[in-house]
Image: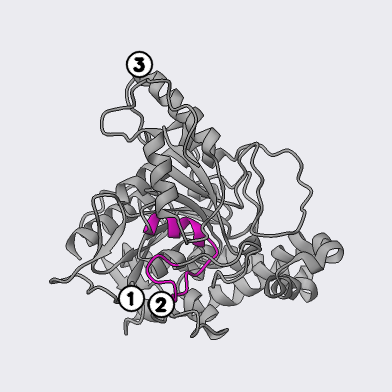
Amino acid sequence: MVGGNDTGGRSMPSGVPSIDEVLTVLEDRSVGLNAITVTTEDRARTLAARSADRVAAGKPSRPLEGVAVAVKDVIDIERYPTSMGSAVDTGRGELTTAPVVTALEEAGALTVAKTNCQEFSYGILGEESVFGPVVNPRGADLCTAGSSSGSTALVAAGAVPLAVGTDTAGSVRIPAACTGTIGFKPTFGLVPVYGVFPLAHSCDTVGFFALDIDLIRQAFLTTRIEGGCPVAVAGVGVPPGRSAHSDGSARRILTAGDDSAAGRLLASVIDESLRLYEVLRKYEAYQVHREFLETQGDRYQPVVRQRALLGEDITTAQYEEARAGQTALRESALRLFDDADVIRTPAMEVAVPTWAEVGSEHRDAFTRYSTPFNVLGWPAITVPVAGDAVDADGALTTTGGAGVEKAGTLPESVQFAAAPGEDLELLAFAEEFLRGA
């Protein structure tokens, strides 16, 4: 993978590794993970050369200058195939680079690879891909979860500092929880999904993985739609009387399971969100896949084909009722923020299982607390609760000591969510939590 011309002898910004170093780290740290579908070396070298030219011209460093980024292989990059982890031919022809990738690159990021994922993003366990499942860097016997499993694995292994995934029911946050990385899902509609192969368009969101909150913050600031206002996006609104960008002081936390009126309201919102999602996801995904199921059904992974067919019997009337319910819930659930600034839930209902332990019951256990925030469209983030330190080369390590995981213990994470549009406040809160954990 490594070789060829570098940046023609031109200097990269101080402290930024050369493209050869970046590609060597990617190659060395991704060995055995089955996390990469294609390495975009030519593109990365071109981007690195442009970065060096900027330095030579005396231009200021950009927010993501020289940062290697991996992109889930449902997101288009021109001149590279978008496999969706599938053998199905979607007949999409020549591809144009997705705006989210272009924005990251314009901020200085170096796109180095596309990553393995659950076929068509359809499944939270991450067990079904034409390339085979991704290996969890925290232990080959551990479930990696999905669907953005390759992206989180590369971050957890220190192969890249930043990766892009998609999150429709938890497909960024749950793999992050299973690998001990940070996984962030922005407010619905604030990061463009053009050039991203859909699963269920009413809930699809681009998200980010890193071990450093500031990298996620920079990725979000770089990619969010300029001037985007969540009030105008598909029924997602800022609670009355609240600023979308408050100072974040004196944050009030509502914890799932609280024995209070707010806690009981949160439980009912979760239940209703899950009910609506079943209809939304089944119907919307079936509309995407109906033609392919009819003509190439045998090319799907069996489990994914079975799941895609679940929408066959959902009527348009049932779907329209669910969409109306989603809009109404997005408005009524904002009452949760009358007395809270941040909502705290478990990342998952269960500990990270081994592949040998995984059963169908884990799907619901993984997504009970993640899916509602897709239906609602609110920003949400999963962060490790203890012990995941990063070594000098950017890989996760576990050591003993107060507040730190002992070697060999499972990753453990917590989820936080905030009101729509309060993404930066949520990231600031998560950063404070990590500093104090």
The structure residue drawn at horizontal position 66% and vertical position 45%, both measured from the top left corner, is 81
The structure residue drawn at horizontal position 59% and vertical position 64%, both measured from the top left corner, is 118
Nearest the eye: 207 or 128:
128
Q: Which residues are magenta?
A: 136-156
Where residue 432 appears, x then y in whole percent?
22, 57
The structure residue drawn at horizontal position 42% and vertical position 33%, both measured from the top left corner, is 107
Locate residue 68 relative to residue 361 in the image: left or right: left
**Residue 328: which quarter of the image?**
bottom right
Q: Is residue 154 magenta?
A: yes
Q: Which residue is mark 1?
A: 410
Precedes in sequence: disc 2 or disc 3: 3
The structure residue drawn at horizontal position 13% and vertical position 72%, both measured from the top left corner, is 402
Of all residues shown, which one is farthest toward the front?
A: 3
Q: Is residue 131 magenta?
A: no
SS at mark 2 in the image:
loop
The amino acid at mark 3 is: Ala
The amino acid at mark 1 is: Leu
Precedes in sequence: disc 1 or disc 2: 2
Distance CA(mark 1)–CA(mark 2): 7 Å
Where residue 53 appears, x then y in whole percent?
41, 19
- Other-residue count near label 3 (Cα within 10 Å), few / some / many at <14 / 14–19 / ≥20: few
**Any mark on residue 401, and which?**
none
Position of residue 84 relative to residue 262, above or below, is: above
Locate residue 291 relative to residue 301 in the image: left or right: right
Q: Which residue is mark 2?
A: 352
Q: Which residue is mark 3?
A: 56
**Residue 369: which quarter of the image?**
bottom left
SS at mark 1 in the image:
loop
Precedes in sequence: disc 3 or disc 1: 3
The amino acid at mark 2 is: Val
Asked if the residues shown at circle 1 and circle 2 are in contact, with their CB atoms under 8 angstroms apart, the answer is yes
